[in-house]
Amino acid sequence: MAEHDSLSEYLETAVDAAKRAGQIISNAFYQKKNVEHKGQVDLVTETDKACEDLIFNHLKERYPKHKFIGEETTAAYGTSELTDEPTWIVDPLDGTTNFVHGFPFVCISIGLTIGKVPMVGVVYNPIMKELFTGIHGKGAFLNGNPIKVSSQSELVKSLLATEIGTKRDKLTVDLTTGRVNSLLFKVRSLRMSGSCALNLCGIACGRIDLFYELGFGGPWYISCPLLG
């Protein structure tokens, strides 16, 4: 019981942090963005950085002895090692390209691992007002309501989600589009939302039947398997 109480407290803190960061995203969503490039098509904005700072400061104030891994700090300073210590892993703005273009599939993703196991997960889309939450072994929820994965068993009746990725060399593009072309003959339809976290949450709540993405996007998606 004590462990569950602690996890509930962690979840409440993470939700609070996500909603605070969500307000920053909402305020900036229809404004002109200051955009930088992490790669050819991979973007980062001052909002990404402001949200990560806010979330980390909020969590560190409550849990100063915990470890922290964030997408923007990792991109700037190198990958942080995941240990057995309680570790908060944060993507402050998943779907940055969507954010830049005013496309509403954007979210904050916050996960807590203990002993390298995902224990608490929060994914919040502040534009669509959708809050996904989960505690290890206690189910997953959307805006407080229990959710479950799709029961669809026929591939031809399935809605598939995937992403193209950020690499634009000819070999990668040819392999990616070839795979998509092949799959389109096997499924009902295909979607690319531009947010890995929201795709996984789509799996968790049953609005998407299948999802795949090639390559390791980063440990900041750690909250999403818990929700799935």
Image (spheres, rainbow, N blue to C red):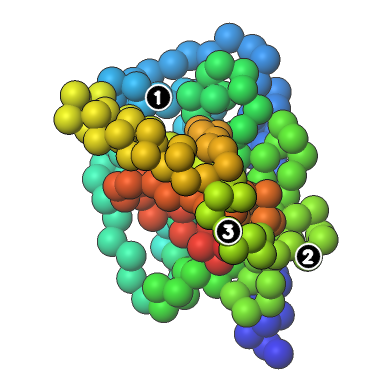
Q: Quadrant of the N terminus?
A: bottom right
Compared across the picture, whether 148 is left or right of 170 comes to right
Q: What residue did someone put label 2 on?
A: 146
Q: Secondary structure at mark 3?
A: loop
Classed neighbour count for the residue bearing mark 3: other residues with Cα under 10 Å, few (<14), some (14–19), many (≥20): few
The structure residue drawn at horizontal position 68% and vertical position 77%, both measured from the top left corner, is: 138
- In the picture, the disc for residue 43 is 1
Using the numbered discs, state the Cα–Cα distance from disc 2 to disc 3 in whole angstroms. Answer: 24 Å
Which label sits in the foreground, 2 or 1?
2
Q: Nearer the viewer, residue 138 or 179?
A: 179
From where the camera sits, is residue 13 visible?
Answer: no
Q: What residue did someone put label 3 on?
A: 154
Which label sits in the foreground, 3 or 1?
3
Q: Is residue 100 above or below residue 179?
A: above
**x%, y% of residue 169?**
19, 25
Q: Secondary structure at mark 1?
A: strand
Q: Earlier in the sequence, mark 2 or mark 1?
A: 1
